[in-house]
């Protein structure tokens, strides 16, 4: 892998299917990025096992191990900083990162709905309850809000007759994995700029 490849720290909280998609992608040197560490907010999860099988360093920073949330915010930011990332990718990471991380690094996140519709923890359920015929997934830059950062990429997923939350979410996740891999690769290879809420691929002045 080229030393010029973008350095990624990927954060996970569960099975790590998005992480696996990224691990598969970075195996190709042309992708332009490498995963230098995988972090988690809990032990014993498949996401960490995937990283370990791939030979990627891991770390765990549990919220319960800190007396206050701001102490966890500072510590996880320090753990991330130790790996000198160019980009932090939340791949199913179920904690909201605080200012120490968000101000130090660009942070990528995904959401299983077409933002700004249906933000929050139950995007799939809320879309179904509203009766929409099309939903989808969003890749965004994280900010201090809940699913409020600048939107990078979106892809639509139709709601089918008879869909329940599990079936719809599974189809969204399939699309989300591909969209995340494509987005991270383009950011690594092409760079990006953000003006207000508008995200564009390409380096400044390019």
Image: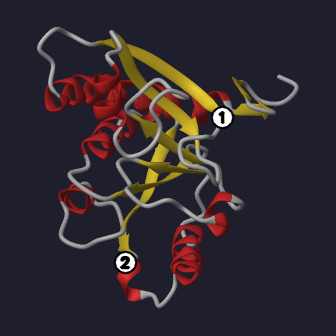
Q: Position of residue 56 (x, y in %)?
A: 34, 60
Determine whether, in the image, residue 156 is placed left or right of residue 46: right
Per the image, the residue denoted by label 2 is 62
Please report whichever mark, 1 or 2, sits nearer to the chain's N-terminal start. 2
What residue sits 37% from the left and 18% below the top?
135
| Res 137 visible | yes
Q: Which of 157 and 16 lies nearest the eye of the viewer?
A: 157
Q: Quick check: marks 1 and 2 in contact, CB under 8 Å?
A: no
- 172 and 78: which one is in front? 172
Real-space Cα distance between discs 1 and 2? 28 Å
Q: In the displayed image of the protein, which residue is found farthest to the right?
A: 205
Q: Residue at x 65, y 58 (%)?
A: 102
Say which element carries label 1. Answer: loop
Residue at the spot of label 1: 150
Q: Residue at point 74% right, 31% down?
A: 197
Determine the residue located farthest toward the front in the rendered image. Answer: 130
Secondary structure beneath disc 2?
loop
Q: Is residue 89 above or below residue 181?
A: below
Q: Position of residue 178 (x, y in %)?
A: 35, 25
Q: Which residue is more in the foreground, 24 or 183?
A: 183
Q: Residue at x 49, y 43 (%)?
A: 109
């Amino acid at each position: 892998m080229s030393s010029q490849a973008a350095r990624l720290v990927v954060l996970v909280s569960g099975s790590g299917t998005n992480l696996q998609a990224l691990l598969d992608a970075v195996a190709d040197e042309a992708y332009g990025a490498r995963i230098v560490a995988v972090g988690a907010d809990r032990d014993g999860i498949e996401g960490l096992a995937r990283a370990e099988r791939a030979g990627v360093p891991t770390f765990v920073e549990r919220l319960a191990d800190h007396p206050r949330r701001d102490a966890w915010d500072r510590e996880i930011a320090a753990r991330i900083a130790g790996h000198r990332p160019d980009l932090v990718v939340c791949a199913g990471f179920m904690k909201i990162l605080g200012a120490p991380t968000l101000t130090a690094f660009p942070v990528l996140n995904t959401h299983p709905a077409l933002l700004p519709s249906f933000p929050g923890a139950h995007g799939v359920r809320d879309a179904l309850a509203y009766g929409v015929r099309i939903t989808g997934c969003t890749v965004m830059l994280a900010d201090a809000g809940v699913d409020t950062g600048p939107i990078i990429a979106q892809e639509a997923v139709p709601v089918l007759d008879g869909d329940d939350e599990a079936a719809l979410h599974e189809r969204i996740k399939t699309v989300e994995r591909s969209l995340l891999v494509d987005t991270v690769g383009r950011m690594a290879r092409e760079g990006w700029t953000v003006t207000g809420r508008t995200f564009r691929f390409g380096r400044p002045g390019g």
